[in-house]
């Protein structure tokens, strides 16, 4: 077998090994996700998700997809507006603790939005 043929076989083998590694990594990740229990769904967790989204768009928290801090004030305002709609539509239906959490989140996010808008 010539050097060129050996090199070709070696390269093909490396490619197959890398593809197999990638496939196994995907399978392992999928199984790991299946085993991790989801947190109990509740109103506070729902609000927290929207608030985190706003913080990502304010550029204060790293975007988990891009691994970068990116500012997008239009999307941040949209997330804050969604929380405001929730506040309006749930008036009289929240516990004192839920109401306080929502009010605090809105106040904090609005102040952060104002600061981010000034820069």
Image: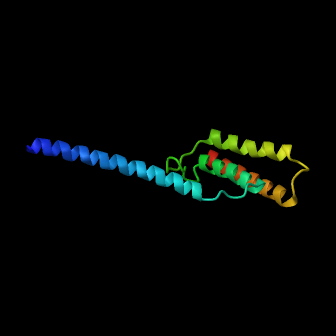
Q: Give me the residue at 54% from left, 51% from top.
A: 64
Q: Quadrant of residue 102?
A: bottom right
Farthest residue toward the bottom?
A: 97
For the residue pair 52 and 119, the one nearer the viewer reads as 52
Residue furthest right in the image: 92
Looking at the image, the residue that sits furthest to the front is: 1
User: Is 1 situated left or right of 64 in this image?
Assistant: left
* Residue reaching furthest to the left: 2
Question: From this viewpoint, is residue 111 visible?
Answer: no
Horizontal and vertical percent position of residue 72 = 59, 42
Residue 1: horizontal and vertical position, in percent? 9, 44
Asked whether 8 or 115 is in front, the reply is 8
Pinpoint residue 29: horizontal percent, then vertical percent.
49, 53
Residue visible at 75% across and 51% down in the picture: 106
Q: Which residue is more in the foreground, 118 or 58?
A: 58
Q: Residue at x 87, y 59 (%)?
A: 96
Residue 49 at x, y = what percent? 68, 51
Image label count: 0
Residue 40 figure quarter = bottom right
Q: Is residue 105 left or right of residue 26?
A: right
Identify the coloring. rainbow
Q: Is residue 116 visible?
A: yes
Q: Is residue 5 left or right of residue 84?
A: left
Left or right? Give the position of 85 relative to 114.
right
Q: Quadrant of residue 9?
A: top left
At x 65%, y 44%, the residue is 76
């Amino acid at each position: 077998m010539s050097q060129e043929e050996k090199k070709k076989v070696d390269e093909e083998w490396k490619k197959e090994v890398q593809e197999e590694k990638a496939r196994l990594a995907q399978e392992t990740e999928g199984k790991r996700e299946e085993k991790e229990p989801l947190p109990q769904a509740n109103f506070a967790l729902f609000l927290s998700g929207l608030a985190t989204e706003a913080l990502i768009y304010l550029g204060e928290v790293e975007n988990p997809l891009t691994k970068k801090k990116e500012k997008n004030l239009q999307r941040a305002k949209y997330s804050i507006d969604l929380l405001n709609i929730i506040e309006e539509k749930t008036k009289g239906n929240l516990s004192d603790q839920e109401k306080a959490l929502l009010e605090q989140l809105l106040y904090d996010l609005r102040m952060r939005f104002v600061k981010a808008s000034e820069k």
